[in-house]
Image (spheres, helix red, strand yellow):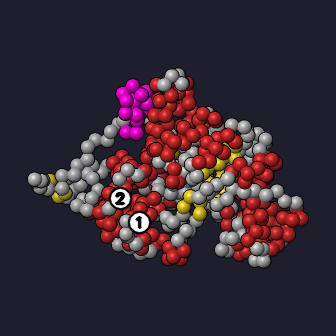
Amino acid sequence: MSTITPPTTSPLGAAVADDRLEPRDPHRLFPGDRRTRDIARGLYERVATAPIVSPHGHVPAEWIARDIPFTDPTALLVSHDHYVTRLLHASGLDLDELGVGGHPVDPRAAWRLFAERQAVFAGTATGYWIDEELRNVLDIDVALSAETADAVYDRIQAKLDTPAFRPRALFERFGIEVLATTDDPLDDLRFHGEIAASGLPGRVLPTFRPDRYLDPDSPEFATDIARLLASEGQETSFRGYLTALEARRAHFIRHGATSADHGIEDPATVDLTGDEAARLFQLAVSGRADAAERQVFRGHMLLQMARMSVDDGLVMTVHAGVVRNHSTATFRRFGADTGHDFPRRTDFVRGLRPLLERFGLEKSFHLVLFAVDETVYSREIAPMASFYPSVYIGAPWWFLDAPDAMARFRSAVTESAGFSRGSGFIDDTRAFLSIPARHDTARRVDASFLARLVSEGRLTEAAAGAVIDDIAGPQPRRVFKL
């Protein structure tokens, strides 16, 4: 027979059920057996407080340049985080109830829906990050639930109303050394200029993201190409098109960019003659290219991006294998990046061969490959990275940036490519408060993996220490030319 615990007065300033959380387990994500866990703890402690190097992410530069306050807990932790909203949608909520896609919403009402459904996050990486953010960043000491929703909301709102919880203060508190944003090629990058001149400790760097200007299937392709050409005073020709792209890359480099990112579904590349590329360009901008011609043009432009990276030194990152906007009805109501993008199988070996035939042996060329198809890590990406000096293994991304998937990733790539061919951890997030949680997760998982190698006699503890030191900072600085 159950008993009812009477309400108690919480530090949250409200009467809540006795849902006080136990202290955070300092050994979370470490192995269960004591010897390996102790090794993991020692390795983790070497890097636990190391500066955060985040060479790919989606935090808007304007937030930091203007030090824009976070408006409310729902906007901060729910509405803009598709990891959160997708599971809530699957549980029966409509996305407009959560403020997705800019739909107006009562933030407290949406927060209550989020709090009532905490059970859907049990065991997920999202649930782990939410817990880390609430405890370690926001100092919440009770479990979020229907009963505590309002009290937790009020406590978070009170913090967001203070200078200590504005973006610039959190940037310093999190120990961020480098934070890269993701930006449209026609962005004037004025916010990056303001940040650079503001004296903020650490760097905020732009990343060149040209997808919409390279893909004839993009809804506004012809209009975007016209804007691109006009921005650099170029004529509507393939040569003018390439010249405009090169000029915009140079603009980004002047503002501190070190990489160009490409979000593509199919990592297929095609090496065309100049005349054939020019012909397909004219067909594409006029809307007369058929599906096969659009695919070939898209593949050739990915190869051209590699050629430009060889010329100007920008690191080329490829995020491949995602089918975007899977739900047409959802896309029409809420727009892109609202939780209905899904992984698909990919073929890097055959797809990238034309590109690597041209540029794979260029030692100054850095090509970082990210996948959401786990099968390609051991079968394709790690073997390629163990031969081509230009190829690096991108850290687990999107559906794979979770503790168990990170451990599988390490097992899949290490035996053939070692640790030196990796990118270092990439948080790839817009959820600003999750940045330290994600990096801490990666450091704990790497410490655990290395500890297992030590306990099995496959690596000395000194060698494991050198590896984890490198992964936490020098490696991403080296790979991303920071």
Question: At label 2, which amino acid type do we have?
Answer: Val
Whichever of labels 2 and 1 marks the residue nearer the N terminus, that label is 1
Query: Is the residue 452 above or below the residue 426 in the image?
Result: above
Q: Are marks 2 and 1 in contact (CB under 8 Å)?
A: yes
Q: Please provide percent x and percent y for residue 101.
A: 48, 71
Q: Residues within 10 Å of mark 1 (few under 14, many from 20)?
A: few
Query: Is the residue 124 above or below the residue 117 in the image?
Result: above
Residue behind mark 1: 90
Residue behind mark 2: 120
For image coordinates 68% across by 51% down, the residue present is 348
Residue stretch in magenta: 28-45
Does the stretch in magenta take in 40? Answer: yes
Query: Helix, strand, or loop for circle 1?
Result: helix
Does the stretch in magenta take in 242? Answer: no
The answer to whether residue 280 is left or right of residue 21 is right
Query: Helix, strand, or loop for circle 2?
Result: helix
Q: Is residue 164 visible?
A: no
- The quarter of the picture where residue 275 lies is bottom right
Residue 383 vs residue 187, the one in the foreground:
383
The answer to whether residue 8 is left or right of residue 137 is left
